Amino acid sequence: MKQLHLNATNVISGRIVSQAAREGYTEIVLDGDAVVTSVAMDAAAVAGIILTRRGGTRRAGAPAAAASAFGSAAGADAVFSSAEARAFKDELVAAGRKLWRRAYVDGNGGNLSYRIGEKYVLCTPTLISKGDLTPDDICLVDLDGNQLAGRKKKTSEILLHLEIMKAQPKARACVHAHPPHATAYAITGMVPPVRIIPEAEIFVGHAGFAPYGTPGTKDIAEKIAELVSDHNTILLGNHGVVSWADSVTHAEWCIEVLDTYCQTLIIASQLSVPIKTIPADKTCALLETKRKMNLPDPRLSGRECTLADMPDNLPSITVCPGACDRGVGPCRLHDTATCPRAAGAQAQAPAPALGHENSETEALIGRIIDEVMKTLEK
């Protein structure tokens, strides 16, 4: 058994446990009063790492041997001022600033949350730029959205985060933002195709899509929550993107991966040559990696069409969210009159490749040149 001794480490985070797993450790020995985050416990359970407190041993996922701020009798104030909460607040601030630096949020847009224990959620406040966010700005709410602590008012879209966390037990954190390239897809009612870039396949895969609903309402929050069993990143019609993960850092990664992927597809579409897809057998290998990482994808549940049926050349950089992942076949979300792909099929037709101009256009240009030359000769 390979042991990692963490002396004087007050907070054991998921990042620490994941790094230990990558380095082959099978047991982590920590101080008796160290706080183990819920993400760290989940990561240890997945990796099969035993967490040992000096003076007692437990396997990850069991109740903590030492006193915790998250016991049933713990009050909101104790949770809000705990060492784990301070670590989560710092992570929320760091993720918010990354969103702002990458121009994924503007003004006071976007919001982030982190589940702490079983009853509480930390979240960003309303009416504040994520570039100006500090740990002191973070709020604490319960799973019904009641604010329990924090000097500023909670985000107006907290219900969205809470409904996702209730519907998906693996969702320990949520990020909502307005990244421009992904939001460009959201305002067309379309989603990007799959089988193009490995990182996008594994960390996002199929982006979900929820038609527009008034932000901050329970109705739209519940509709989005219906998608989280198959999707960790969801396009919000005429609005933006929301993602969930085991940590706010990882949820922010999903936003980055999706927006960069959408940007790459938009650029590639301007080259006027076919976009190649990853071969089916290679895609299967990526999906197996995704399965081992316990990441959601409708293709892993058998609810999408088979990989063997997909084309090798991508017909379009947009896919109707109600159709299968090939972007063909009957649309399950829209009728023929309202499906964006049906309505815009002609506009979405690929441009002719450079150097292969239409013969009629060439003939017209030739006649114009002849007429100009005759005029000059007079």
Image: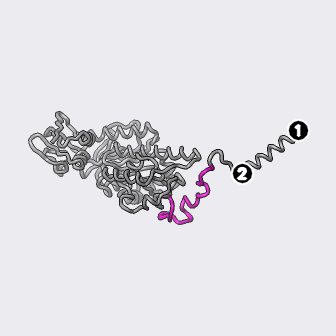
Residue under label 2, please give it. 359
Badge 2 marks a residue whose secondary structure is: helix
Mark 1 to mark 2 CA distance (whole Å): 27 Å
Compared with 56, 294 (above or below) is below
- The reply to whether residue 316 is in sight is yes
Circle 1: is it few (<14), some (14-19), or many (20+) Cα within 10 Å? few
Displayed quadrant of residue 168: bottom left
Identify which residue is drawn at 29% across, 48% down.
115
Does the magenta portion include 84?
no
Identify which residue is drawn at 38% across, 43% down.
253
Quadrant location of the C terminus in the rendered image: top right
Residue under label 1, please give it. 377
Give the residue type at disc 2: Ser
Q: Is residue 271 left or right of residue 203?
A: right
Badge 1 marks a residue whose secondary structure is: helix
Q: Which residues are magenta?
A: 327-352
Residue 349 x, y percent position in the rendering = 60, 54
Identify which residue is drawn at 80% across, 47% down.
367
In front of the other: 46 or 183: 46
The colour scheme used here is one colour
Q: Main secondary structure of the magenta part?
A: loop
